[in-house]
Image: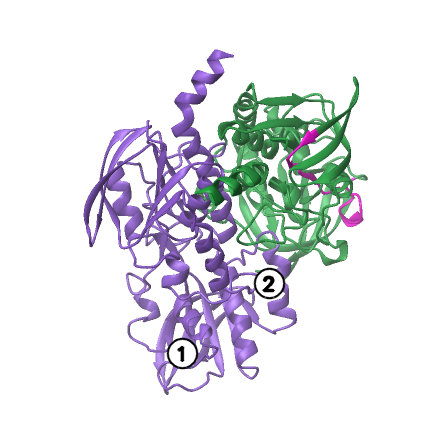
Chain colours: A green, B purple
Amino acid sequence: MPETILVIGGGPAGLEAARSIATIGGRAILVERRPVLGGTPDESNYAALTPRMGSAQDALDILRAGVVDPDIDVRVNTTVTGCSGTVGDFAVTLISPTGETTESVGSIIVATGFQHFDPGRETQMYGYYEHADVITLPDAEKMLKEHHFVRPSNGEAPRNVAFIQCVGSRDRRLGNEYCSKVCCGVASKEAIEIRRLLPDCKVYIFYIDMRMYGYWENEIYWPAQEQYNVTYIRGIVTEIVAKDGRLLMKGEDTTMGRPLEVLMDVIVLSVGMEPSRGTRDVAGILGIAQNKYGFIALPGEPMDVVSTSVPGIFVAGAAAGPKDLEDTIGMAGAAAVRAVGAVRGGARAGAAAAR
Amino acid sequence: MPETILVIGGGPAGLEAARSIATIGGRAILVERRPVLGGTPDESNYAALTPRMGSAQDALDILRAGVVDPDIDVRVNTTVTGCSGTVGDFAVTLISPTGETTESVGSIIVATGFQHFDPGRETQMYGYYEHADVITLPDAEKMLKEHHFVRPSNGEAPRNVAFIQCVGSRDRRLGNEYCSKVCCGVASKEAIEIRRLLPDCKVYIFYIDMRMYGYWENEIYWPAQEQYNVTYIRGIVTEIVAKDGRLLMKGEDTTMGRPLEVLMDVIVLSVGMEPSRGTRDVAGILGIAQNKYGFIALPGEPMDVVSTSVPGIFVAGAAAGPKDLEDTIGMAGAAAVRAVGAVRGGARAGAAAAR
């Protein structure tokens, strides 16, 4: 019975799952389609983490260092293209620039993550592809990583910046009814960073509900308001149009109960999470059930937060739906436990029977 | 070097941590101060779980069955009263009705959980100890478990029920600035259950922000509104007074911008989470740092969500702050990985060096 565990995806979930497997005495093959490890936080240039503003790069370095281990076989530029067999004895086909191999593994952890919602897809009212100064959370993050924040249209410092929450989330029209969980926190973090860089710039966050669960409330929401004067407005934005070289935002302030028409220099769309293409592809290849949004289904919840519809195949992180980094790290440990348990199941059951 | 791991607390976090340890080949001693396993969900009579309404009893039975294992030594009616030593070699003193023992363990997982905020403590404006018909989320849960819901003052079915959110949470006056994360979901779940039992009863939820992250949005918030006609009102409740045998609730509807004065038959206070007495006591005994709220501090976040300030001592579940059940289960797996890694650290380092 092969004791090796395949971990698919080299982002935080996969890195932590592989490290966890090695920590408890297992062996892992970690495959990543990109040439580098790090996943979406690396690919999308995350700078400071929410809520404590720690360096995303430092955090990824810790996770990457965790998989430098004789029991972890890291394969970048590699994708999974086939899978057969059952728990304890899967045969997986891996393709890389150096060729195709088939590996025998006892269990599998899917850690293929999410992608940011594409605001051009169906929410044309925000004009993401029309107006240069309408950007997304990851677009803003990219600028903030370089310690500057400008109007993309002219390179000048903005005087007014607005974040619009729930773009691609809580939206039945798009089929994305779920809340993406992290966007309220990430927008507030970026708002603070903009206020630090540009003390004369006014920053507004237009929201439905501010979802700052747990310590995000005191660690980021209160400081944003009290120390950085970020203005939170409960409202709905229905349209963005160009006007006099700026952006006219139309909608309604639902707390004041009045129409909203304000000029902004930069508008940041707080795009939510959708299953990554890797998550959709791998679900198909492995034959594991997805929920109606395309994320990996978790039939055993709440008592089992990592088992998929196929015995021996587990999931960690945002491949299973919106997750913050802490959720992902916890889930990766749980997935490692179940995956190691699955490969040891036979031996363990025998030992227990022999007592 | 002792390979046994001490798990303190027999609620969901401790049960899942102990099961995980055994799954990956470790040994655990699981101690629980009460005579039965199950923790707060058992002690507080949880009935249906949020958001999917599965039976809490069934879920606990699954968790309890997981610790029936030759490698898990379960000790109920037992508390930890002393601890010395360091990672790899702790000596812990356990007291039970049968006497005191000292156990040698390699690492420790703290899973001592939370307690519900006592609404009599400082929020006298809600009159919890004054009005029989002002109850808490767990009080309501206890009735719902018996499939009835009445006015405690007279045993009659209520015609109007209001939930007040954020009692003991998001409240600087109390020192509880954090959001307790689960109360929006739990209140909405109970509101649905009341509507099912009493179709003629109107149910209102007064809230600041509806924090329905991830799938709670589509799994409970939308059905509550659309299928069960629960009325959500963004507002602040400042006072509850008795009037004509009912409860007059005073405050402000912040969306409509007008004062609020409505008569209710039952008012449910959505009390938040505070560290349990066990969490505070055990933190002192083990010498692990707590945050300013008394929950166990996690200095390694976000990349390490389970390590406390003391090497070899880990935490799982709501002892570290507000957590839902899924968070807790994930975290328990991660804690098991780190705790097993800590006891195997020496052997593993030697093996790696020998390669």
- Front residue of B102/B39: it is B102
Residue B345: quarter of image? top left
Residue A236: quarter of image? bottom right
Q: Secondary structure at mark 1?
A: strand
- Front residue of A19/A226: it is A19
Q: Which residue is mark 2?
A: B221
Would residue B128 appear left or right of A44 to someone viewing this image?
left
Q: Amino acid at mark 2?
A: Tyr
Can you tell which mark lies on residue A131? none
Q: Secondary structure at mark 2?
A: helix
The residue furthest top is: B354
Residue A118: give x, y in percent of width and height: 75, 41
Q: Residues within 10 Å of mark 1 (few under 14, many from 20)?
A: some
- Front residue of A272/B37: it is B37
Residue A315: give x, y in percent of width and height: 63, 41
Q: Which residue sits at x=60%, y=44%?
A: A183
Q: Amino acid at mark 1?
A: Leu
Residue A74: quarter of image? top right
Span shown in magenta: A104-128
Cβ–Cβ under 8 Å for marks 1 and 2 = no
Q: Which residue sits at x=74%, y=55%?
A: A175
Q: Is residue A216 magenta?
A: no
The residue furthest front is: A354
Residue B322: give x, y in percent of width and height: 43, 50
- Front residue of A99/A274: it is A99
Which is closer to the viewer, label 1 or label 2? Answer: 2
Q: Residues within 10 Å of mark 2 (few under 14, many from 20)?
A: many
Q: Is residue A127 magenta?
A: yes
Q: Chain of mark 1?
A: B
Q: Which residue is mark 1?
A: B248
